[in-house]
């Protein structure tokens, strides 16, 4: 008798009609074989799927160029499908589940003819973790199979966990003909199912990541009493040797990976890495909050990554003696066969191919690497990986940070008054859009908890869930907001990167009740003398500007927040509106 898994895979094959079906075991040896196939047999836009890079300087590294129209998440083609539109909420594109299936079925029909269907059984989370979830994805491109092998725990353990059960995540993926007109990323949260066609790119195609671990998992969390969040996880060690575990939610391309691997500039402080993108948060047996990172790798932004800004990532990328590393849509230095991107070093090599494989001719506004070019690399190669990374129970959380890219107005750091005020501070978050999605870049938008594109259900219910969740555990973590991106005269006021440890230090001093703070409408903010600035070259005037609250700027912000919250109508929790009223009155008085 075929298991539910085998039955499901067969059904997908009947629909998509591949020439071959290959079950992946997730091994390194297998990745090498798939890369060979990708180099020789499969094509994207007429080009091989993989190019080998200089293995002396970048061990085990390969370059992938995606289709030029397929370089970022496409939010307008991403749907959540429930019978009722209201359940998707104004934060999602909605299509009725039956209509969506009928529409996409036509596109999947025969789409794998002449291709191989790769079957990827994988686990999000450690095999021994009670919070881990097994899934299977089928795909027709080696790039996705190899990437998923790096990003998840793939193979035997996942198959064992699924066994004969019907209870596993199901992901059907095909690159189709890579035509954006025929591209859809459809989520069916009630069936634990994702169907994605027409894109081979990151969050559209590596279904374990945003599709499962956030959109579907957030819905599961609502049903089961936990949270799936767009958050990094770090342990911050203080000079006394104590480690505080902290979560931070920033929107896409707003600094999670960098904070997750921060190289401290303060003696005695050290950051340990647990995750850089996704956290699953549960209430542990002792009644406290615990977080796991369901992923096993980083899918990080290349531009801006350098020895100066993120030395630990540079070490991670060059450590690939046992694991495979992929680069997607970076430039290629033809002389050395090395990957290159803007910000990696000071000079631009002369003889380069751009991210599309064309001769790079520097011109205004043209970059050699795509602004959303990325690397895919195992977390096991990270020199700062926490010894708790594989702890199936996760780590106990002392603080939650919300942040975004705001060039004006939002202070460097502030602390919420209590849990509900913290939920409000997350809910009112705004951030400037980045190249991680195909929308216009640099436009301010509301992005509650950095989850706007990833919450798999009505966000009003999500806020309600956060509020109720906060009543259920002991030692609620303090909630903070940060902003590394405030500018004056078009210059960043704060040096950022490794210097962000100074902000983490203040946060920990607050957790340990070592320092006071000033009450403002936006929360408690530091006395600037409590920010450790020794060894930092920053004028006191700039420090002050980082915390300035200008009434007129905030008037516009308040209006924007009110407009956003109003979109959720009666479903919006009254508690949030109460916080909003307090906030507004406080700012206006
Ligand atoms: P996703 O992978 O899309 O979720 O992005 P992310 O949130 O992990 O962002 P990441 O750390 O990759 O940073 C995105 C961009 O912001 C990179 O170009 C970084 O160099 C830049 N960046 C990160 N931290 C800082 C900072 O403290 N200050 C400044 N000025 N830029 C930063
Ligand atoms: C993001 O956009 O938040 C990412 C990259 O982490 S992707 O996998 O494309 O979602
Ligand atoms: Mn992300």
Image: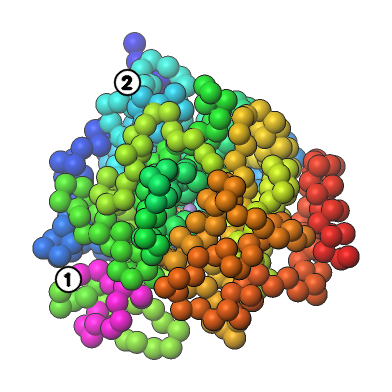
Q: Residue furthest top?
A: 1
Residue 424 versus residue 516: which sits nearer the camera?
A: 516
The picture places residue 264, in percent across and down from the top left corner, at: 38, 60
Q: Which mark is residue 337?
A: 1
Q: Which numbered disc, 1 or 2, marks the residue that appears first in the sequence?
A: 2
Query: Which residue lies under the disc numbered 2?
Result: 160
- Give the residues in magenta: 337-352
Q: How is the image coloured?
A: rainbow
Residue positioned 86% across, 53% down in the render: 581
Task: State the SS at label 1.
Answer: loop
From this view, report whether residue 358 is shown above or below residue 268. below
Q: Quadrant of residue 336?
A: bottom left
Gap in angstroms between the C-alphas marked 1 and 2: 41 Å
Q: Is residue 414 visible?
A: yes
Residue 373 x, y percent position in the rendering: 38, 65
Please say whether residue 447 is visible from this viewpoint: no
Indicate yes or no: mark 2 CB to ligand 2 under 8 Å.
no
Cβ of disc 1 within 8 Å of ligand 1?
A: no
Q: Which of 347/485 is in front?
A: 485
Q: Main secondary structure of the magenta part?
A: loop
Direction bottom: furthest residue: 363
In the rendered image, the residue lying farthest to the left is: 56
Q: Is residue 351 magenta?
A: yes
């Amino acid at each position: 008798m075929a298991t539910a898994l085998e039955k499901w895979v067969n059904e997908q094959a009947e629909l998509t009609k591949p020439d071959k079906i290959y079950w992946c075991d997730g091994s390194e040896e297998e990745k090498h074989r798939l890369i060979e196939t990708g180099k020789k047999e499969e094509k994207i836009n007429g080009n091989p799927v993989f190019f080998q890079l200089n293995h002396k300087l970048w061990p085990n590294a390969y370059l992938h160029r995606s289709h030029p129209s397929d370089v970022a998440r496409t939010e307008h083609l991403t749907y959540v499908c429930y019978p009722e539109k209201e359940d998707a909420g104004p934060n999602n594109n909605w299509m009725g589940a039956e209509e969506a299936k009928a529409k996409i079925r036509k596109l999947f029909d025969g789409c794998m003819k002449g291709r191989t269907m790769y079957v990827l059984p994988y686990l999000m989370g450690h095999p021994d973790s009670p919070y881990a979830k097994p899934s299977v994805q089928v795909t027709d491109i080696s790039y996705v199979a190899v990437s998923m092998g790096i990003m998840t725990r793939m193979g035997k353990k996942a198959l064992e966990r699924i066994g004969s059960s019907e209870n596993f995540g199901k992901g059907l993926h095909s690159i189709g003909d890579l035509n954006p007109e025929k591209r859809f990323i459809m989520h069916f949260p009630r069936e634990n199912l994702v169907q994605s066609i027409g894109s081979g790119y990151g969050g559209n195609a590596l279904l374990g990541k945003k599709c499962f671990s956030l959109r579907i998992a957030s819905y599961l969390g609502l049903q089961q009493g936990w949270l799936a969040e767009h958050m990094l996880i770090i342990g911050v060690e203080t000079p006394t040797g104590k480690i505080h575990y902290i979560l931070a939610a920033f929107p896409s391309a707003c600094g999670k990976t960098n904070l997750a691997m921060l190289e401290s500039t303060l003696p005695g402080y050290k950051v340990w890495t647990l995750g850089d993108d996704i956290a699953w948060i549960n209430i542990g047996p002792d009644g406290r909050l615990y977080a796991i990172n369901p992923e096993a790798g980083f899918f990080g932004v290349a531009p801006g990554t350098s020895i100066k800004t993120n030395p630990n990532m540079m070490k991670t990328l060059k450590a690939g003696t046992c694991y495979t590393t992929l680069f997607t849509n970076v430039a290629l230095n033809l002389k050395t066969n090395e990957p290159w991107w803007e910000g990696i070093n000071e000079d631009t090599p002369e003889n380069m191919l751009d991210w599309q494989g064309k001769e790079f001719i520097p011109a205004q506004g043209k970059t050699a690497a795509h602004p959303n070019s990325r690397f895919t690399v195992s977390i096991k190669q990270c020199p700062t990986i926490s010894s708790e990374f594989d702890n199936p129970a996760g780590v106990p959380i002392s603080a939650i940070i919300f942040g975004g890219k705001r060039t004006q107005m939002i202070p460097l750091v502030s602390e919420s008054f209590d849990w509900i005020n913290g939920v409000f501070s997350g809910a009112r978050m705004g951030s400037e859009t980045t190249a991680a999605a195909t929308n216009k870049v640099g436009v301010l938008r509301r992005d509650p908890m950095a989850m706007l594109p990833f919450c798999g259900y009505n966000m009003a219910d999500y806020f309600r869930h956060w509020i109720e969740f906060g009543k259920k555990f002991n030692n609620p973590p303090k909630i903070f907001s940060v902003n590394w991106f405030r500018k004056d005269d078009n210059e960043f006021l704060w040096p950022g990167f490794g210097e962000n440890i100074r902000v983490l230090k203040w946060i920990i001093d607050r957790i340990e009740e070592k320092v006071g703070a000033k009450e403002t409408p936006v929360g408690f903010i530091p006395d600037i003398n409590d920010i450790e600035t020794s060894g930092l070259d920053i004028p006191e005037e700039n420090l002050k500007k980082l915390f300035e609250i200008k009434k007129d700027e905030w008037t516009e912000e308040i209006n924007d927040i009110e407009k956003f919250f109003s979109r959720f109508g009666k479903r919006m929790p009254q508690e949030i509106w109460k916080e909003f009223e307090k906030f507004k009155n406080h700012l206006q008085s």
